[in-house]
Image (cartoon, rainbow, N blue to C red):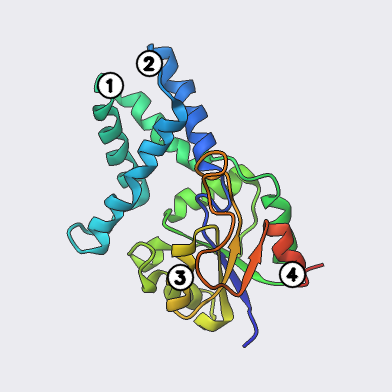
Amino acid sequence: MTIRALVFDVFGTLVDWRSSIAQDAKTHLSPLGLNTDWGAFADAWRAQYQPAMEKIRSGQRGFCKLDELHRDNLDTVLKELGWQHVDESTRQTLNLCWHHLEQWSEVQAGLAQLRKSFILAPCSNGHIALMVHLARHNQWHWDAITGAEIAKDYKPQAVVYQASAAALGCLPEETMMVAAHSDDLLAAAHAGLKTAFIARPDEHGPGLGESVARTPVDYSASDLLDLARQLGCK
């Protein structure tokens, strides 16, 4: 069946969250006399991500937007570092750093190429407002915003992928999930979607991201421009 829509993971696939968060944390916390390995700070904050969402996926906690989970996780990390004295205003500012993460270098051009031939939308665990802000910050042009908020659940639950396809008027098999994470693609495939892997070998630091897919995929590309070439976008 013909692929009509591409839906995208965002954190790590489209944006370099680690470098962005490390820089923003340094900018906002250093003036308070605080210092650490800022890359490790970003890693520690991100490490709380899956455990926080698992409470929602398992039914222990009702669905809430990612801003709320990010804030809970930030408070946890600051406490672990002994930085409980960081003021509320700084915490709020830091939490909103996820709304203006910087994209990987080819993403804007790659999305523009892909949009010539396909419907495009994020399929992220980020909520709609967060996705809007990231899109405006990086000058992305989506046809719609799908993902966790419309499904009221978090990936890798099948409903997130299937609800995203349905929102675009597509069957799962007419929709392709594009991601830099093999577990995301495996879950999307189980939900009936086609899959495309994007290599982001430096997502978690130099050489610490995925450079090759660890699960069978329909397409594997070095970046979005490479994927556009493989899909015949001109």
Q: Amino acid at mark 1?
A: Trp
Q: Is residue 223 above or below residue 48?
A: below
In the image, farthest residue toward the right: 234
Residue annotated with mark 2: 34
Residue at position x 43%, y 78% from top? 191
Residue annotated with mark 3: 186
Question: Tag 4: Cα neighbours inside 10 Å, few (<14), some, or many (≥20)?
Answer: few
Q: Which secondary structure, mark 2? A: loop
The C terminus lies in quadrant: bottom right
Residue annotated with mark 4: 230
Q: Which secondary structure, mark 3? A: helix
With 168 as the anchor, is 116 left or right in this view?
A: right
Q: Amino acid at mark 2?
A: Leu
How many numbered markers are drawn? 4
Is the Cβ of the residue at disc 1 closer than 8 Å to that at disc 2?
Answer: yes
Q: Considering only order in the chain, which callout, 2 or 1, is on the residue closer to the N terminus?
A: 2
- Cα distance in 3D space between marks 2 and 4: 47 Å
